[in-house]
Amino acid sequence: MSVELTTEDGGKRVVNGDGDEVGVVVDVDDGTAYVEPNQEIGGELKSRLGWGRDAQSRYPLRHDAIDDVADEEIRLREKY
């Protein structure tokens, strides 16, 4: 699936395949969403998404991790 993200996607929740919130899109720059992660997500999920263990306030969301973009949320693929 080719994902076209725009500034309109700012503020959307990012959820995993189970519907659990991973974070919130805080910015979209040049088609890449930047996510402020939920403080409760584990290091394993952050690693699969390519997010470091440091305490950055926002991380880029890889396009290949996205399964669907809906009106109010961005759903990650099952493996995430």
Image (tube, helix red, strand yellow):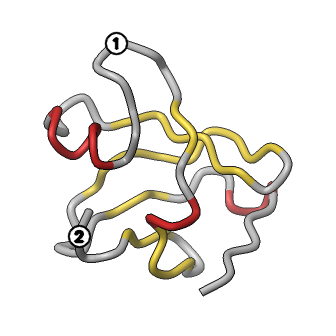
Which residue bears the numbered disc 1?
Answer: 54
Residue 51, given in percent of the width and then of the height, sits at: 39, 33
On the image, the x and y values in percent for residue 77 come to 34, 75
Q: Is residue 44 above or below residue 64?
A: above
Q: Is residue 64 left or right of residue 30?
A: left
User: Residue 76 appears in which quarter of the rendering?
Assistant: bottom left
Question: What residue sits 79% from the left and 56% below the top?
Answer: 31
Residue at 54% x, 54% y is 62
Direction top: furthest residue = 55
Q: Which residue is mark 2?
A: 79
User: SS of the residue at dot 1?
Assistant: loop
Q: Earlier in the sequence, mark 1 or mark 2?
A: 1
The secondary structure type at the circle numbered 2 is: loop
| Of the pair 66 and 25, the residue shown nearer to us | 66
Kind of residue indicated by mark 1: Asp
Residue 21, position in %: x, y? Answer: 28, 55
In the image: residue 73, left or right of residue 25: left
